Image (tube, rainbow, N blue to C red):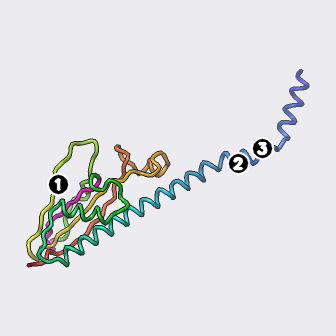
Amino acid sequence: MTRKLTRFLRRFRRCEDGNATVEFVIVFPAIVGVMLAAVELTFMTLNHAMLERAVDIVVRDLRLNTGSNPGHDQLKVDICEKAVFIRNCSTNLKLEMIRQDPYVGITIPLQPDCTDLSEEVRPVRQFENGQANELMVLRACAKINPIFPSSTLGATLANAEGQYALTAMSVFVQEPL
């Protein structure tokens, strides 16, 4: 019995069948992880580009429509119409418009005020329509759900609610009537 077992173990040790399977099992999860991260990063970049573009277009319309003074809700609707790839934009987007003194520099809070699904709805942190010739900063923050929340990149980016924040900011001067 011992001789048979010893012979079997010797044959098993010399046998090279299955080497490709071992390499596949080691390398395949890493390749799939990189592919999922690439797809996640692609969609994150696409969403950020669409948010930046939407904010830029809306601010451009504000600059060109001298005398118009749209409110928070109208700007949010306009940005959401232009940011077509952001899902649930009306609930996941928060805007801040802050009046600035151009001679002091831009002094806005470092952390953007984003939506938080775990808390009650908060009023807008700061949204002031500017007077003639005032420098205004418009910052938009959108919370995005990852495409693959359990992937390495999706889990790293997500916060407690399972979302990550994308911000876009633009500066303009409120033109006189």
**Residue 54's x, y, as percent?**
30, 67
Q: Which residue is mark 1?
A: 124
- Disc 3 marks which amino acid? Gly
- Give me the disc on residue 44: none
Residue appearing at x 17%, y 76% in the figure:
65
Front one among 15 and 71: 71
Q: Which residue is mark 2?
A: 23
Label 2 environment density (alpha carbons within 10 Å; few <14, some 14–19, many ≥20): few
Residue appearing at x 27%, y 66% in the figure:
169
Q: Is residue 123 left or right of residue 47?
A: left
- Tell me which numbered mark, 2 or 1, is placed earlier along the sequence: 2
* Element at label 1: loop
The image quadrant where one finds the C terminus is bottom left
Q: Which residue is mark 3?
A: 18
Distance from the alpha carbon under mark 2 to that under mark 3: 9 Å
Label 3 environment density (alpha carbons within 10 Å; few <14, some 14–19, many ≥20): few
- Disc 1 marks which amino acid? Val
- Tell me which numbered mark, 2 or 3, is placed earlier along the sequence: 3
